Image (spheres, grey):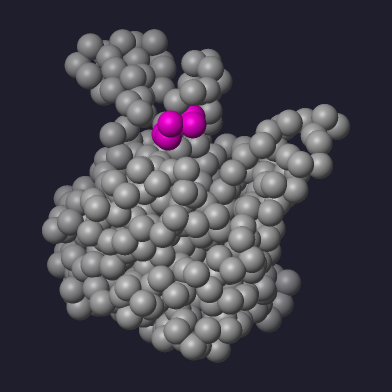
Amino acid sequence: MSDWYRDFANSGVGTTITRQLGLPRPAVLRRYEPGQPLLPGPAVVGSAGAGRLGNRLTALLRDAGVAVQSLGAADVEDGERPAAVLLDATGLTGPGDLAGVHAFLAPAVKRLRRSGRVLVLGDPPTGAESPAQAAARQALDGLVRSVAKELRDGSTANLLLVPARTEESLAGPVRFFLSGRSAYVDGQQVTLSGAAGDVAQDELRPLAGTVAVVTGAARGIGAAIARTLHRDGAVVVVVDLPSAGDHLAEVANGVRGTALQLDISREDAGQRIIDHAVQRHGRLDIVVHNAGITRDKLLVNMDPARWESVIGVNIAAQLRINETLLASEHFRTTPRIVSVASTSGIAGNRGQTNYAASKGGVMGMVRATAPLLGAHGGSINAVAPGFIETEMTARMPFATREVARRLNSLQQGGQPTDVAEAIAFLASDAAGGISGEVLRVCGQNLVGA
């Protein structure tokens, strides 16, 4: 659905009017297009504390064809405006080291161009050796979230935590956060958990040779996920209810995959998914749990049927399917699972106690399942969308929809492709060092953490 206000604010007349009236002007975001460079300009790399990643960051940027500018603030002022600012803040020992964070970021961010990227890399607070070190490490979270809210013109800021011995999986997440794939990911934190990440040699088809299943794929976000996985090289099996058969067949034909009409709440859904993938395509590598329902009502007015149907489809079905996947010999070669959660499961939402509970359950499931998949070199993560422009949000009352669109740092709704890009990344080997994480795709929604 088109965002009329964003389009108006970026027109010739609209730019003048919004500037004169002091109105917000949502930017046209830099989204990924196959074949585009990682960044549309140079990057600035700096460090604070005893950072251990600076040389590695510089090398991976140059390998990606990105020019790296000098670390000095004076040189930043004199040089070309950077498209990205990267700060290695590993090795902080206490709050005093945060002065170096400020000294580097303030002049570098000031020079950032439109749709720029700020990426801070740090150590997890949980591994700190002292309260002072934990304070400095945790401070980066608040700092990055605040920087993200200060940036304008479609720029984003995110935090990547890099525990010791996970450095080998750094390249994929760094490239994701700098690229157009992360256009609607802002103010977020991701922690590496292993050294299994590996950027594909074929950057245009990082999922080549894999077979992926996407549930709830007949329309909306599910269809966008299927198209994006297909674009990235995967053979895709699309799954949805028999009642959505016509739409499902259309999506399957569009991605040159196969369709499986299935109610995922069936006890045998997991085995039917495995059988279809193996019989038709010889293997199964990726499962995306996108299917979900809403049955909104205030808690005090909610009947048991509404509650049980949402819990049954949104979380209980995923648990059963995952149990079958983990027991199957056909899902043992670096398996990837990505579940679609929701910001409602983080911040809550009036009238959605059942839905929020189910999506909170998805996040708990993901964290607890990560070690089980890790035994096979696999990963499981969740993506939590915020306000996304879909048929469902298009039916919202005008005023409610406009408010919901603006309640994030990027001042606009996301697109289904924004969710799909994050899922395609987490389904790839480039994200092999990330597991048990929840990545919000919400433009840094101002409601919730």
Q: Nearer the viewer, residue 138 or 212?
A: 212
Q: Is residue 229 left or right of residue 363?
A: left
The correct choice, above or below, for 195 with respect to 275 in the image is below
Q: Dividing the picture into quarters, in which one does residue 7 lie?
A: top left
Task: Write the residue at 28% across / 61% down.
Answer: 257
- Magenta region's main secondary structure? helix
Question: What stretch of residues is rendered in magenta?
Answer: 389-393
Q: Is residue 138 visible?
A: no
Q: Position of residue 6 (x, y in %)?
A: 33, 24
The correct choice, above or below, for 167 with respect to 408 in the image is below
Magenta-span inclusion, residue 390: yes
Q: Is residue 7 visible?
A: yes
Q: Dividing the picture into quarters, in which one does residue 415 lie?
A: top left
Q: Dividing the picture into quarters, in which one does residue 72 lie?
A: bottom left
Task: Write the residue at 50% across / 76% down.
Answer: 379
Which part of the image, by quadrant, shows the N terminus?
top left
The correct choice, above or below, for 8 with respect to 154 in the image is above
Task: Write the residue at 33% across / 80% down.
Answer: 282
Q: Is residue 264 left or right of residue 429?
A: right
Task: Write the residue at 28% across / 68% down.
Answer: 234
The correct choice, above or below, for 370 with respect to 364 in the image is below
Q: Position of residue 112 (x, y in %)?
A: 30, 46
Q: Position of residue 42 (x, y in %)?
A: 20, 57
Q: Nearer the viewer, residue 39 or 19?
A: 39
